[in-house]
């Protein structure tokens, strides 16, 4: 950030009075500009022992599979965001149930909230952000082609819980992906 969104003057990077972390602070009007983590909301959509996956038509990870999910919008609840993302990406209406995973991803300033949900009816199709959409059984999950580690983690918890006959709540923190070692 270079300029204040309130008065358009340059901002400084400093610790404001009464705070403990550096922030963008306007040199003119003293407005403090906070930058906070983004919420990603999505769903594991269930239908006849299968889950709904979308093949991404956009970057990042174009062509890889993902759960229907995306950034939460202002003015909506987390469950509403998960339903909206599913409608946008998979043209599917869902009934959102309990929050299933909360995954902190601090190195990219994100928190991923994945709900369990039920497909209403049997209609789905690729939305603008998807190349294709599919209902897949556990043995059909393209594990090596999943777009994000958060999706892999949520799906592994889901199938483990399903085999155990009970669903719990899962919370974890993901660090940066391990980098391959040359040599």
Image (tube, rainbow, N blue to C red):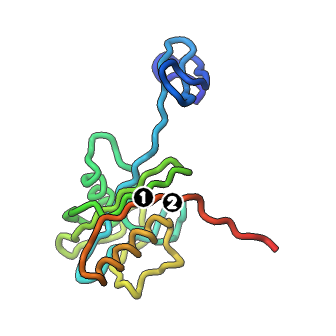
**Which residue is located at x 49 percent, y 12 percent?**
29
In the displayed structure image, the side of residue 1 where residue 123 appears, left or right = left
**Which residue is located at x 53 percent, y 78 percent?**
144
Q: Nearer the viewer, residue 134 or 145?
A: 145
Image quadrant in which you'd find residue 1: top right
| Residue 149 visible in the snapshot | yes
User: What residue is pinned by disc 1?
Assistant: 103
| Residue 91 visible in the snapshot | no
Residue 27 vertical position relative to residue 100 in the rendered view, above or below:
above
**Disc 2 and disc 1 in contact, CB within 8 angstroms:** yes
Location of residue 125 in the rendering, given as x and y in whole percent from the top left corner: 32, 71
| Label total for image | 2
Residue 74 vertical position relative to residue 125 in the rendered view, above or below:
above
Location of residue 157 in the rendering, given as x and y in whole percent from the top left corner: 37, 73
Q: Earlier in the sequence, mark 2 or mark 1?
A: 1
Which residue of the protein is positioned furthest toward the right in this rendering? 183
Image quadrant in which you'd find residue 28: top right
| Helix, strand or loop status at disc 1 | strand
Q: Badge 1 local density, few (<14 within 10 Å), some, or many (20+)?
A: many
Residue 20 vertical position relative to residue 87 in the rendered view, above or below:
above
Q: Nearer the viewer, residue 124 or 21?
A: 21
| Helix, strand or loop status at disc 2 | loop
Which residue of the protein is positioned furthest toward the bottom in this rendering? 139
**Which residue is located at x 36 percent, y 57 percent?**
113
Residue 115 vertical position relative to residue 138 in the rendered view, above or below:
above
User: What residue is pinned by disc 2?
Assistant: 174
**Which residue is located at x 47 percent, y 19 percent?**
31
């Amino acid at each position: 950030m270079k300029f204040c969104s309130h008065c358009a003057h340059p901002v400084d990077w400093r610790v404001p009075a009464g705070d403990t972390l550096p922030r963008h602070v306007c040199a003119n009007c003293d407005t403090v500009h906070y930058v906070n983590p983004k919420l990603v909301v999505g769903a594991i959509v269930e239908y006849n022992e299968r889950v709904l996956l979308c093949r991404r038509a956009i970057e990042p990870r174009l062509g890889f599979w993902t759960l229907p999910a995306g950034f939460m919008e202002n003015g909506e609840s987390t469950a509403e965001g998960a339903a909206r993302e599913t409608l946008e990406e998979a043209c599917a209406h869902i009934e959102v149930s309990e929050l299933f995973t909360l995954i902190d991803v601090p190195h990219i300033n994100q928190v991923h909230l994945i709900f369990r949900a039920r497909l209403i009816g049997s209609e789905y199709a690729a939305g603008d952000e998807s190349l294709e959409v599919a209902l897949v059984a556990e043995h059909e999950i393209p594990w090596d082609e999943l777009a994000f580690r958060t999706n892999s983690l949520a799906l592994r918890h889901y199938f483990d819980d399903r085999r155990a006959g009970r669903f719990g709540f899962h919370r974890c923190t993901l660090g940066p992906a391990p980098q391959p070692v040359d040599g």
